[in-house]
Image: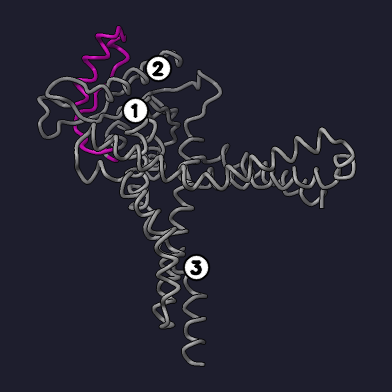
Amino acid sequence: MFIFATIMLLLSILWFSLVMIREPRTLWSGASFLFLLLQSAIWLMAVLFMNSERIMANRLMMLLLTLALLVVMVLIAVFPVAFIGVFFWEGIKNIRREGLRPANALSLLFAAGLVIYTLVWPLFMTQIRDVWVFALSVILSLAVMWLLGIFAVFCFSALLNLVHVKKNRGLDQVVVLGSGLMGDQLTPLLKSRVDRGIQVMDRNPGSLLILSGGQGSGEELPEGQAMATYALEQGVDPERIRVEDKSLNTEQNLLYSSQLFAGPATAVVSTRYHVFRALVLARMQGIPAIGYGSKTKWYFTLNAILREYAGYLKLSWKTQLLAIAILSLPVVLLACLSSWG
C-alpha cells in the first residue's frame, strides 16, 4: 500500500509540474493541484498505517493524532455551512455598498441556490415516483455537482496563475487591461491595475507598458489615454508607454494590444479575479502570457469571481455540455431498462 501510494504521489507531482511548466492557463492546473493534494493525503494515511503500532504505543502521539482527527472532522462538518454563510454575508454587503442590481446579487443568489440544492432538493427527490422525472432530477443533480466541481477547479487554477517566484521574468511588455472611468478620471480599481502594471514593468527593465482600453458609455475619453496620463503622473518614462484606445472588451484588449508588442514575453495585468479568464482568452488568441493581479475589496471579489466563472462557462459551454451528457448517459440507460422492465 505504501509503495503504491508513493508511486501515485510521485506521478501526481510529475503531472502537476508538467502542467505548470507547459501550459498553466487551463483548468488542468487546478485539477492536477487538487489531485496532488488528494494523493498527498493518501500518502500520509499510508505512512500512519505503516507506523500504527509505534504510534499507538506513544500516548502523546496518539493524543495529538486524535485531536488532529477531531479538528479535521469538525472542519469538514462546518465547512459547507461556513461556505454558504460567507457568500450570504458578502452578498448582502455587496448589495448594500454597490446597489441592488442583478450583477451585484450573484453571491446572494449562489448561496440561496446552494441552500436549495443541499436541503430542499433531496426532499423533493424522495417524493418522485415517475421513472423519467426521477432520472431528470438525477441528471440535474449531476449537472450541478459537475459545475460546482468545475468552479472549485476554476478557483484553484486562477490562484495558481497568480503565483510568480521570480520578480524579473524578462518581459517585453506589460499589458494593463482597462475597467472603466468616472468621466475622465480613473476609478480606484483601475488605478490599482495601473499601479500593479508599473510595479511589474519596473521589475522587468526594458519592458513596455501597454495601457489598453477604449471609450465606453459615459466616459469622456478612451481608458487607455486616461491610464497613460496617470502613469506619466507616477513618473513612468513616456518612451516606455504605449496606448491602445480602441478596445471595448477583454478579447479586444488583447487583440489590439498585440499589435504593439515589442517581443513575445508578455504579462497581462488585471484585477486578481479577472486574470485567469484574461489568460484563457490570450491562450485562445495564441498569445503566450503570464498574469499579475491587483488587489480589490473582498466583498466585491466573491461576486466578481462568480461573474468570471460564468464568463468561463460561456467560453467552454460545448465542453461542459458534453461532459454533463456523458455523465447523464448511464442514468438514461438505467431509466430505459427500468421503464421497459
* Residue ID for mark 1: 297
Q: Residues within 10 Å of mark 1 (few under 14, many from 20)?
A: few
Residue 284 horizontal/vertical position (percent)? 39, 45
Q: CA distance from mark 3 to mark 2?
A: 46 Å
Q: Secondary structure at mark 3?
A: helix
Lower sequence index among marks 3 and 2: 2
Lower sequence index among marks 2 and 1: 2
Discs 3/1, front: 1
Please tell me the numbered disc located at residue 336.
Answer: none
**Residue 279 in magenta stretch:** no
Residue drawn at (30%, 12%) of the image: 239
Q: CA distance from mark 2 to mark 1?
A: 24 Å
Query: Which residue is nearer to you in this view: 282 or 199?
Result: 199
Query: Which residue is nearer to you in this view: 230 or 65?
Result: 65
Q: Residues within 10 Å of mark 3 (few under 14, many from 20)?
A: some
Residue 12 horizontal/vertical position (percent)? 67, 45
Residue 41 horizontal/vertical position (percent)? 69, 44
